[in-house]
Image: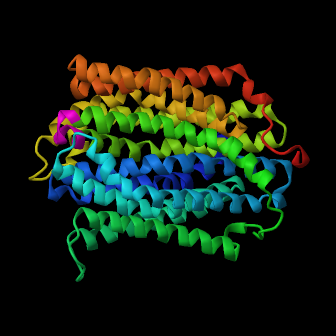
Amino acid sequence: MPTGSALRTLLRLAVPMVLARASQSVITFADAIQVKHLGYQAIAATATGGLNVTLYIVLGWGTVFIIQSFVAQLVGKGARDDAPRFAWYGLAIAAAAALLGLAVIPWIDDALALTRYSEAVRRPMASYMAIRMLSVFPALGVEALGNWYGGLGNTWMQMVAGVITMVAAVVLNWILIDGHLGAPALGVDGAAVASTLASFAGFAFLAIGLWRRWGGAPRVRARGLSWHELGRVLRFGLPSGVNWFLEFAAFQLFVNVVLASLGDEIVAALNAVIAVNSIAFMPAFGLASAGAILAGQAIGRDDRDAVWPHVRTTLWCTMTWMGGIGLIYAVFPDRVLSMFASERSGHLVEIGGTMLVISAGWQLTDAIGMTLSETLRAAGDTAWSAGARLILAWLVFTPTAYVVVTRLDGGPVGAMLCLVGYLGLLAIAFIWRFRSGAWRRIQLLEPTLV
């Protein structure tokens, strides 16, 4: 058991981050829930489409997460006044990603035409994704500024932005999906428009807060910026972004290519399970991110021996939470998935219930993996993590899942068992890397700032 003071320190940072981290996952979850009355094809279109958009955004998310590591180490060094320019670096990365995202939109329909989705799923999914791609800048902007504030030790600013985003998404979905308050009934497109507007609302709060210096932020001026320092941010941030992207890409390739061949109903059921998991794991991810802030500040103080106590406390909390979630999945799978039930949902609950029970098997290993990977990221050990995910996701999980599902007729059960195995191997890899101590030798900050 960690000490009471250690728990209080972690939870003080983590509780706001739970809501902060949940916003985009809640958006996709809310979209799927609020279109369920339109049928399981609508669920498949919104849930899978939302995850496909997340696949693009996650590269930028992982990259701007490094902003938190830089700022946390600067705070630990007592160099808080050097932190403001990193907010601008984060916004620059978000803007660049948004411009590239606009160029991707015309190719979405052609890309989905290569899959085996039915027309009833493919067409609304393409339209949904095209609209959601307009939210790339605010989604990344919230992460960039939220991680900047988090590095300073203020996690409630991003929490407020997350709450604004989530509430706006749910309310606007109600208005635009079925056409309430005189608005047109846009169906699946209405969910996409609502999600995009909600993302801009959350970003607006943080942008105004940064300008008005809310939350104890130092004055943020565009001074002292350098291409060299931005390059250093990208040097450590891109491997982290690639890390997330490659893992997510392997999973989305699996969903869009392999599982799509099993039918719309199975795709809808799997995405319902993933949507539930994406919400349930957010408290653990918030805890892992908070633990990473404490680890980064310890490294900034050149007290690397203090990192393990923070990691130990974080592991205790994340594993307790995820273990409880796994127990709920194992005992009450149908009750959990009943949220997606409607007269037109078919056998979604029955199919998804079995998947949800199997997903209980990865909860503890996922808690270990996310805690240690976030700690390694705080230390700047991002390249190795990206390599581990590349090897395990693309050379182990993807080919194995393809063979199990398409050659051995493993179906959705085989698919889920492959996911359990993949996350277990990933946790083992991160345990080995952390115990090796290689992260202790990495120098994240510029020598001039050390």
Residue 228 location (% of width, % of height)? 80, 51
Say how the picture is coloured.
rainbow
Say if 16 sits above or below 383 in the image.
below
| Majority secondary structure in the magenta region | helix
Residue at x-position 62% and y-position 56%: 93
The extreme right residue here reads: 448
Residue 272 location (% of width, % of height)? 27, 44
Quadrant of the drawing holding the N terminus: top right
Residue at x-position 37% and y-position 41%: 277
Magenta stretch contains residue 433: no
Q: Is residue 331 visible?
A: no
Magenta stretch contains residue 262: yes
Provide the residue span drawn in magenta: 261-269
Comparing 51 with 399, the one in front is: 399
The extreme bottom residue here reads: 182
Q: Quadrant of residue 278?
A: top left
Q: Quadrant of residue 398?
A: top left
Q: Is residue 327 visible?
A: yes
Residue 28 location (% of width, % of height)? 35, 54
Q: Is residue 408 left or right of residue 20?
A: left
Comparing 323 with 443, the one in front is: 443
Say if 156 sits above or below 10 in the image.
below
Say if 109 sits above or below 439 in the image.
below
Residue 318 location (% of width, % of height)? 52, 36
Quadrant of the drawing holding the C terminus: top right
Q: Is residue 109 left or right of residue 209?
A: left
* Total number of numbered discs in the rendering: 0
